[in-house]
Image: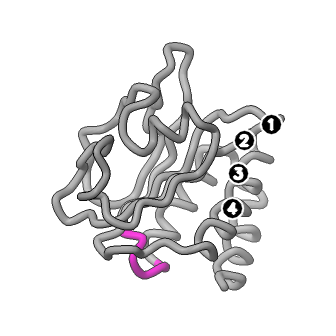
Amino acid sequence: MYEKEYSIIEKKIENLNMDDSLSFVCEFLQKNIKGYDWVGYYFHNDENQLILKTYFGLKTDHTIIPFGKGICGQTAESNTHMIVDDVNNEENYISCNINVKSEIVVPLFSNNINIGQIDIDSNTLSRFKLDDLKFLKKVNILISKKI
């Protein structure tokens, strides 16, 4: 699953710089994969915060997220992905949009160090599965080669 989408991303970003690659990935995923309603990349800073680098979807006020806060902040601390089937059942969740029902966050590693993450929100309950996780890990490997 997602082989076609992966191939398109791989070819398109081959000659792009990192910023343009991030922008392309966010826009492509949001426009081309059903249920990927908001797609963004956050990167770590020196103050244990995540800084929103680029995104595609509805405007968000969450441009800076402290480590440990919300799904993204938990991923920054744990160095592992998170899939939330129903954000309303998650105590440590930062609400970006009342329509969001589920979320996936996949860390971005460079030289085995967690430097950021891709964050995807969906307006569909239980939208994200193992296929999404595998696909997004592969996309992040492509992005990590740009760093």
Residues under numbered marks 4 and 1 in contact, where contact means CB atoms less than 8 Å apart: no
From the image, tell me which residue sits under label 4: 139
- Majority secondary structure in the magenta region: loop
Q: Secondary structure at mark 2?
A: strand
Q: CA distance from mark 1 to mark 2?
A: 5 Å
Circle 2 packing at 10 Å, graded few (<14), some (14-19), many (20+), is some
Say which label, 2 or 3, has the lower sequence index.
Answer: 2
Where does the image place residue 45, in percent across and percent down from the top left? 54, 21
Circle 3 packing at 10 Å, graded few (<14), some (14-19), many (20+), is many
Residue under the image location 66 percent in, 70 percent down? 135
Mark number displayed over residue 112: 1
Where does the image place residue 85, in percent across and percent down from the top left? 39, 67
From the image, tell me which residue sits under label 3: 143
From the image, tell me which residue sits under label 2: 109
**Please, what is the three-letter code of the amino acid marked with disc 4?**
Val
Circle 4 packing at 10 Å, graded few (<14), some (14-19), many (20+), is some
Name the quadrant of the C terminus.
Answer: top right
Furthest residue toward left: 98
Where does the image place residue 69, in percent across and percent down from the top left? 37, 33
> How many labels, in total?
4
Q: Nearer the viewer, mark 1 or mark 3?
A: 1
Residue under the image location 42 percent in, 75 percent down? 127
